[in-house]
Amino acid sequence: MKEFVIDTSVVVKWFSKDEDDSAIALHLRQEMLDGHCTLIAPDLLIYELANALKYNPNFTSKDVKDSMDSVYNMGIDIRGVDNLVITHAIEIAFKFNATIYDACFMALSRIEKKPFLTADYKFAKRIKGFKDVIRLSAMK
């Protein structure tokens, strides 16, 4: 079974169907729901996603709550950010001049030894030296 560590940029596309690569993101979600792949993310995804959806002008408070309920019920393997993850994230953030937030997803990917899937192409370019970084657009 395929397993990926995903970041918030992938999940946001599930709820923003007019964005580039949203069809690819929706296909990935369906693959997870059908049991063909496992998606893993740090719990930071929950905070970032709720915040991103709050600022979507098409979403009401109820829409954000409903969206978050659906995310919790989808079966994403949400992991807590422990000392090991944050230690790796700090190293990555300093090495690549990235935010700790973005680096947490990459850190979990390294620790879990699973490919990191992102739709944040600026971040993907910044961490170009890492192996197993997959751009969502490459999943076509």
Image (tube, rainbow, N blue to C red):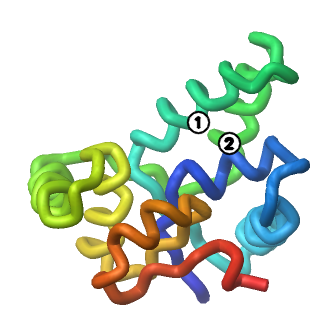
Give the x, y percent position of residue 48: 50, 35
**In terms of depth relative to the viewer, which is nearer, 67 or 20?**
20
Sooner in the amino-acid sequence: mark 1 or mark 2: 1
**In terms of depth relative to the viewer, which is nearer, 86 or 66?**
86
Q: Which residue is found at the position 68% from the left and 45% from the top?
A: 12
Is residue 96 toward the left or the right of residue 49 in the image? Answer: left
Image quarter of residue 91:
bottom left
- Residue 49: which disc? 1
Mark 2 sits on what residue?
Answer: 71
Do the numbered discs 1 and 2 sit on residues whose CB atoms are within 8 Å? Answer: yes
Q: Tell which residue pokes out farthest to the top in this image.
A: 61
Mark 1, Cα crowd under 10 Å, few <14 / some 14-19 / many 20+, is many
Query: In this rendering, is residue 86 above or below 60?
Result: below
Which of the image's four quarters has the C terminus? bottom right
- Kind of residue at badge 2: Val
Is residue 128 toward the left or the right of residue 140 in the image? Answer: left
Give the x, y percent position of residue 88: 15, 61
Nearer to us of marks 1 and 2 is: 1
- Kind of residue at badge 1: Leu
Image quarter of residue 127:
bottom left
Is residue 82 toward the left or the right of residue 108 in the image? Answer: left
Query: In this rendering, is residue 10 above or below 45?
Result: below
Query: In this rendering, is residue 63 above or below 43?
Result: above
Give the x, y percent position of residue 10: 64, 57
- Residue 138: which disc? none
Which of the image's four quarters has the N terminus? bottom right
